[in-house]
């Protein structure tokens, strides 16, 4: 009995050291979950920026003079609100991941502290079941009994200390579970809000299509020509080169001076200079934005698993994520293209061109004039990776350096 009690005390003392070590190793989100925290910060920032863009578009819609312009600005405002909801969902998922990680650590610590405590309780219960008469009948001196009593008295503070640690872990576990419930509730609310905003945008886009039916014949001719160019092109780079050449020709024709009005008195006519050609806006640093909310997973020049060097950046978006125009421009191509899914090519003028691939649905067509932030399509539901390439005069440009 004496040896058993000594072994029990030594084991309890060793467990106290283990408990102290475990309690000093408190959950540190900066060390353990830095990736999730960074995603949470980025998602919150994207949500705030999207809501600011939405408010700006709504103000422009109120000030619009024509019905068509009002519809365009309202669509852009709704698309920005959709992206804000998507960013909230991404933030909610990161928050849930952080709470789940905290829960897992708390449960592991609780299990670690409960195991030796249960063993100690079982031993004490076994000792308490023995009647005092049987203890007196066992061989040994009265000194051994006094020593055993002293050992038990020394063990009680250890037991109290360990049970206090378990109680603290249980309280923190309940707090983490409450945080998990709050995070899951916020995530569900964001998903419900996203579905409502998508339905509203779909209704608004259908209304815009009904109002623009009179222009559908010319738009179809231009779209058919673009699709024909896509079939002839050997690859997507050749297609973009052809479209950039067409854009340069179109811009050169637009710069040609128009006819000079005939003067009332030809005898007094003087050589009047031609009206100045319109200057195309230059795509400056800060005027470009990512067309979809998400996390950049590949940058310019990186080599993928197939050994192909990237000419742009790839963003992991939310499934079915809203894609908008990254900058003002005119749609040169919109449709399916071999190996790339649905793609859209936007001519920004001045030799600047954007290629966006990986779309599952398009809400813009060839010939559409877009403002920055107008909806152009949706990301896929399974593979939601969107690739964006920005080119100037046929050369890839680092998008990160152009972002506002």
Image: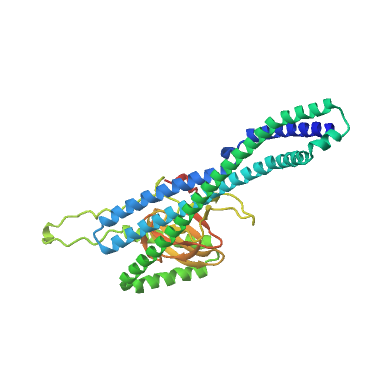
Q: Residue furthest bottom?
A: 217
Quarter location, residue 31 = top right
Chosen colour scheme: rainbow
The one nearer the camera, 343 or 76, is: 76
Which quadrant of the rendered structure holds the N terminus? Answer: top right
Q: Residue furthest front?
A: 133
Residue depicted at 39% across the width and 73% down the height: 221
Q: Position of residue 47 (x, y in %)?
A: 43, 49
Q: Residue furthest top?
A: 143
Q: Position of residue 112 (x, y in %)?
A: 69, 41
Q: Is residue 352 left or right of residue 271?
A: right
Q: Position of residue 286 (x, y in %)?
A: 41, 45
The one nearer the camera, 232 or 82, is: 82
Q: Position of residue 7 (x, y in %)?
A: 80, 33
Q: Is residue 319 visible?
A: yes
Q: How many marks?
A: 0
Relative to residue 401, is residue 191 depicted above or below?
Answer: below
Which quadrant of the rendered structure holds the C terminus? Answer: top left
The one nearer the camera, 358 or 274, is: 358
Relative to residue 24, is residue 352 depicted above or below?
Answer: below
Quarter location, residue 222 = bottom left
Q: Is residue 107 left or right of residue 190?
A: right
Relative to residue 117, is residue 353 depicted above or below?
Answer: below
Q: Is residue 370 visible?
A: no
The one nearer the camera, 103 or 222, is: 103
Residue depicted at 38% across the width and 60% down the height: 330
């Amino acid at each position: 009995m004496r040896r058993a009690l000594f072994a029990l005390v030594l084991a309890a003392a060793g467990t106290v050291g283990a408990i102290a070590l475990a309690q000093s190793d408190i959950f540190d989100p900066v060390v353990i979950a830095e990736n999730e925290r960074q995603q949470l910060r980025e998602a919150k920032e994207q949500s705030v920026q999207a809501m600011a863009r939405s408010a700006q578009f709504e103000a422009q819609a109120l000030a619009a003079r024509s019905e068509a312009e009002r519809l365009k600005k309202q669509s852009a405002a709704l698309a920005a609100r959709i992206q804000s909801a998507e960013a909230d969902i991404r933030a909610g998922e990161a928050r849930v991941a952080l709470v789940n990680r905290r829960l897992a650590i708390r449960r592991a610590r609780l299990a670690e502290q409960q195991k030796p405590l249960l063993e100690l309780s079982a031993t004490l219960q076994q000792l308490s079941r023995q009647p005092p008469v049987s203890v007196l009948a066992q061989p040994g001196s009265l000194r051994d009994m006094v020593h055993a009593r002293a050992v038990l008295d020394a063990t009680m503070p250890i037991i109290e200390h360990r049970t206090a640690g378990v109680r603290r872990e249980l309280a923190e576990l309940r707090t983490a579970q409450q945080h998990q419930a709050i995070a899951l509730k916020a995530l569900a609310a964001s998903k419900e809000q996203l579905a409502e905003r998508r339905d509203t945008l779909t209704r608004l886009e259908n209304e815009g299509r009904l109002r623009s039916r009179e222009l559908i014949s010319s738009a179809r001719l231009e779209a058919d020509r673009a699709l024909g160019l896509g079939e002839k092109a050997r690859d997507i780079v050749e297609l973009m080169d052809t479209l950039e050449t067409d854009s340069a020709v179109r811009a050169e024709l637009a710069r040609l001076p128009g006819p000079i009005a005939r003067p009332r008195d030809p005898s007094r006519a003087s050589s009047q200079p031609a009206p100045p050609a319109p200057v195309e806006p230059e795509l400056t640093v800060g005027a470009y934005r990512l067309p979809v909310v998400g996390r950049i997973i590949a940058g310019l020049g990186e080599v993928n698993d197939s050994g192909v060097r990237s000419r742009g950046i790839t963003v992991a978006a939310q499934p079915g994520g809203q894609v908008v125009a990254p900058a003002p421009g005119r749609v040169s191509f919109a449709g399916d293209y071999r190996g790339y899914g649905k793609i859209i090519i936007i001519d920004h003028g001045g030799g600047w061109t954007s290629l966006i691939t990986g779309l599952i649905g398009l809400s813009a067509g060839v010939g559409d004039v877009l403002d920055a932030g107008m909806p152009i399509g949706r990301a896929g539901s399974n593979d939601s990776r969107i690739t964006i390439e920005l080119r100037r005069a046929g050369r890839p440009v680092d998008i990160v350096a152009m972002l506002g």
